[in-house]
Amino acid sequence: MKDFPETLDFSYETQPVRVVFRPGASVSATPGEAAGLGLRRLLVVCGSRGEATARTVADALGDACVGLHAGARMHVPVEIVERAVEVARAAGADGCVAVGGGSAIGLGKAIALRTGLPLIAVPSTYAGSEMTPVWGLTEHGAKRTGRDPAVQPRSVVYDPDLTLSLPVDLSVTSGINALAHAVEALYAPDGSPLVSLMAQEGVRAMTGALPGIAVAPDDLDARARALYAAWLCGACLGATTMGLHHKLCHVLGGSFGLPHAETHTVILPYALAYNAPEAPHAVAALNRALDTDDAPRTLHDLARRLGAPGSLAELGVTEADLEVAALQAASQPYANPREVTADGILGVLRAAYEGHAPVS
Ligand code: NAD
């Protein structure tokens, strides 16, 4: 089976983003990216744990840096955004550089949403936010997301050196988070042949790199291949509409406070197994990229082999939570190849709760 339906019928929109990829680029390329965008007064934002790395980027920017704000937090709480916007305004910033994982880039996007300031992203995980025009904000305990071209970073600087410090457990779950973007892009209603190629190459490169990183976290070649895969998977996320898997992870993260990358890791094989009967082209493409005849099982086994959490129970979810989550996830319509029912979702959640090998 071909990996894209025989009848070619698609639209594809290119995001206006420049990508630079090389070891050392966070320091060697960020100043040039800022200058290329005409930016002279940049605020660098990061989380508290990423401050030392962000400082090296701020130092490289020299006089073009007007401040470093280490205020990013998980899920982008709105109070944190208000504080960061004040800091950016007080410093007279004409742009932001976000250094770190999805949380730091999320703060940079929220500043861009509020102020219109252009954003440069220097990612240090594989979450992929840097390649999307999607923002997220948490207010009164609820996370809202939306799409706005204003939050799409104008320039993305990929530096594999920055990922050397990412602990193995987070590298594995963050890498599988990236795989989830590629998987859902392959059956997205707005997929295209180019997205399909990026998704397959992303899956191939990430699943090839992660076992090497688990054995030797300081293997720069494996790190570079994983970050390259993260770029491709992030580009898939930015170009398409995600389905059941992302919806479930959003509900589990938002309402039950589950950790982002770990939740993606646990849910992915089961969401894919549920969708597989209605997504034969996507499954064929994944099988080829993974060199298997059972993509959900292979993804499940890979995560287990690399020591990732294997069940929702391990993440602290209770059986009683499953029905609540299923009802929430079924309450709003969204694109998915297979019909989404509360019962269907409950089946996916139960399987993920138990953590046994998925059955397509
Ligand atoms: P994160 O940014 O919260 O980082 C996880 C932890 O890893 C943090 O403690 C951080 O300090 C640490 N860390 C990051 N890089 C490190 C490094 N190189 N070395 C050592 N420690 C490092 O988590 P994440 O998984 O990168 O991002 C998750 C967030 O991003 C979620 O809120 C999610 O909703 C959002 N996200 C948004 C999009 C989008 O398109 N808008 C896409 C993907 C993820």
Image: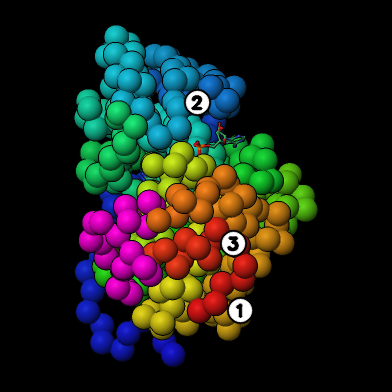
Q: Is mark 2 within 8 Å of ligand 1?
A: yes
Residue 304 placed where, x, y %?
68, 61
Secondary structure beneath label 2: strand
Q: Amino acid at mark 2?
A: Gly
Q: Earlier in the sequence, mark 2 or mark 3?
A: 2
Q: Nearer the viewer, residue 211 or 224?
A: 211
- The residue indicated by pointer 3 is 354
**Cα–Cα span, label 1 and label 2:** 38 Å
Q: Amino acid at mark 3?
A: Glu
How many C-alpha atoms fall within 10 Å of the one at disc 2: few (<14), some, or many (≥20)? many
**Cα–Cα span, label 1 and label 3:** 26 Å
- The residue furthest top is 90
Residue 290 placed where, x, y %?
58, 74
Secondary structure beneath label 1: loop
Q: Nearer the viewer, mark 2 or mark 3?
A: 3
Q: Quadrant of the N terminus?
A: bottom left
Q: Amino acid at mark 1?
A: Asp
The residue that appears at 73% across and 44% down in the rendered structure is: 218
Question: Does the image show residue 185?
Answer: no
Q: Nearer the viewer, mark 1 or mark 3?
A: 3
- Residue 309 got which mark? none
Say left or right for 194 vs 321: left
Please determine whether, in this image, residue 24 is positioned above or below residue 281. above
- The residue indicated by pointer 2 is 47
The residue that appears at 39% across and 42% down in the rendered structure is: 255
| Part of the protein shown in magenta | 324-344
- The residue indicated by pointer 1 is 291
